[in-house]
Image (spheres, rainbow, N blue to C red):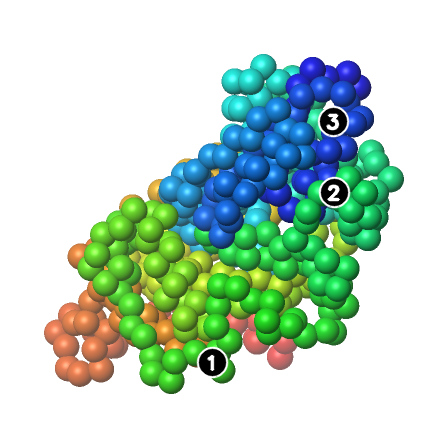
């Protein structure tokens, strides 16, 4: 394949550092390294210097934290998205944003190709490339992991050593990680045996529940139409709000997850995740919905959460079906405004209070005390009608 210029999704880690050099050697054209600041703890000056030292024509670093939270995290959490009952989709939500900005940069730089560091075994290759094709099908796609013979972390490390490329991964500590405002993920290396417990020193965003404070923290989260807008009465921007939730959740040992998931390509994969702020946000949002959302609307919405989450996980963020589902999910949030109060304690996130001007909870109906609005005798006919088919079935059997 002949290309004139490539825009590479670049992090400065092992894979993309090697890829940056490999693209230059194999395609003999300029490479623009694009790095997205999604809230990960990086020395961006060092990333830029490393990219230039490795031969990039240009290193572009984009601050996308607010966009990431407002346009990707919040929509997913309005829908209570969760994959296979556990995973809050931290990497899955980041990839379509990175790929979208990559496409924009390629068009601005008159590049005719884009590249990424995802392996041929994983989900990220699908997420990147479905986005490229959905937004600009004319761009050529280069996936080095599907072309080269550097088919292991060990060989990548050797290539980096041969080309004097400094990388943060060592042969003694070979797992890979991906982090952003929503989470940190750990995969590979010593984690590939699902029986091995993760090294406690590996975690970055969360304290161990055993080491969390001995007294609980209380947090009140205000929502407007499904979106969090304030913590303990203080209004914050989306990114600042999420950073504060990460701090509160992390200090209280909340958000660690160790799971074996089903990748889109067909294999099972073990992943360890830290998602403190997301865990707190989801608990608060779901709790507020219990008093503000109609029962039947909630049941229909909940029936769609699995499919919606699979679309994100599988890389279909920019698809017609995703647009349809997002509109549906957002329609259910029209009344989800109010405040949820949570108790955070040693890895636990417990809703302990909720209030809303949109509340459907009426104490006058629900009370165990005397009331004047509910006739308990009406329940007899209600039960008889609901039991009618059971009665007919029983009579038939006899």
Query: Which structural element holds mark 2?
Result: loop
- Report the residue marked by disc 2: 164
Q: Residue at x 43, y 38 (%)?
A: 63
For the N terminus, give its image quadrant.
Answer: top right
- Name the side, left or right, on which 89 lies relative to 380: right
**Residue 311 screen position, x and y as percent:** 58, 43
Cα–Cα span, label 3 and label 2: 15 Å
- Report the residue marked by disc 3: 24
Assess whether mark 1 and mark 2 are in contact (beta carbons under 8 angstroms): no
> Is 111 rendered above or below residue 305?
above
Q: Nearer the viewer, residue 48 or 321?
A: 48
**Residue 370 screen position, x and y as percent:** 15, 82
Name the quadrant containing residue 128.
top right
Q: Nearer the viewer, residue 72 or 293?
A: 72
- Residue 140 disc label: none
Considering every residue shown, the one lying at the far right of the view is: 149
Q: Residue at x 41, y 73 (%)?
A: 252
- Residue 211 disc label: 1
Q: Nearer the N terminus, badge 1 or badge 3?
A: 3
| Residues packed near mark 2 inside 10 Å, few (<14), some (14 to 19) or many (20 plus) | few
For the C terminus, give its image quadrant.
Answer: bottom right
Q: Residue at x 62, y 55 (%)?
A: 177
């Amino acid at each position: 394949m002949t290309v004139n210029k490539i825009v590479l999704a670049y992090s400065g880690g092992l894979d993309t550092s090697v890829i940056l050099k490999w693209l230059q050697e194999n395609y003999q054209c300029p490479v623009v390294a694009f790095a997205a600041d999604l809230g990960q703890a990086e020395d961006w000056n060092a990333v830029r210097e490393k990219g230039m030292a490795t031969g990039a024509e240009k290193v572009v670093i984009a601050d996308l934290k607010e966009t990431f939270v407002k346009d990707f995290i919040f929509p997913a959490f309005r829908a209570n998205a969760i994959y296979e009952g556990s995973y809050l989709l931290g990497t899955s939500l980041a990839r379509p944003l990175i790929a979208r900005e990559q496409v924009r940069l390629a068009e601005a730089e008159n590049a005719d190709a884009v590249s990424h560091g995802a392996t041929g075994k994983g989900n990220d290759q699908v997420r990147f490339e479905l986005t490229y094709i959905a937004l600009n099908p004319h761009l050529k796609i280069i996936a080095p992991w599907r072309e080269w013979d550097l088919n292991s972390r060990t060989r990548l490390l050797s290539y980096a050593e041969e080309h004097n490329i400094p990388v943060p991964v060592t042969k003694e500590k070979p797992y890979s990680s991906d982090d952003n405002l929503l989470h940190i993920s750990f995969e590979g290396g010593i984690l590939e045996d699902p029986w091995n417990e993760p090294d406690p020193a590996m975690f970055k965003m969360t304290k161990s529940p055993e080491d969390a404070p001995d007294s609980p923290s209380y947090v009140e989260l205000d929502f407007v139409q499904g979106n969090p807008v304030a913590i303990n009465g203080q209004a914050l921007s989306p990114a600042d709000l999420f950073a504060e939730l990460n701090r509160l959740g992390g200090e209280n040992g909340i958000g660690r997850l160790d799971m074996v998931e089903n990748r889109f390509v067909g294999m099972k994969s073990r992943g360890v995740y830290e998602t403190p702020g997301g865990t707190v946000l989801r608990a608060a949002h779901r709790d507020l919905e219990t008093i503000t959302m109609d029962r039947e609307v909630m049941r229909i919405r909940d029936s769609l959460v699995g499919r919606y989450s699979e679309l994100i996980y599988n890389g279909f963020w920019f698809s017609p079906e995703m647009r349809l589902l997002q509109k549906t999910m957002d329609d259910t949030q029209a009344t989800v405004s109010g405040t949820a109060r949570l108790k955070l304690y040693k890895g636990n996130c417990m809703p302990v209070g909720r209030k809303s001007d949109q509340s459907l909870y009426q104490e006058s109906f629900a009370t165990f005390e005397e009331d004047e609005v509910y006739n308990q005798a009406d329940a007899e006919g209600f039960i008889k009608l609901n039991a009618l088919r059971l009665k007919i079935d029983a009579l038939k059997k006899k």
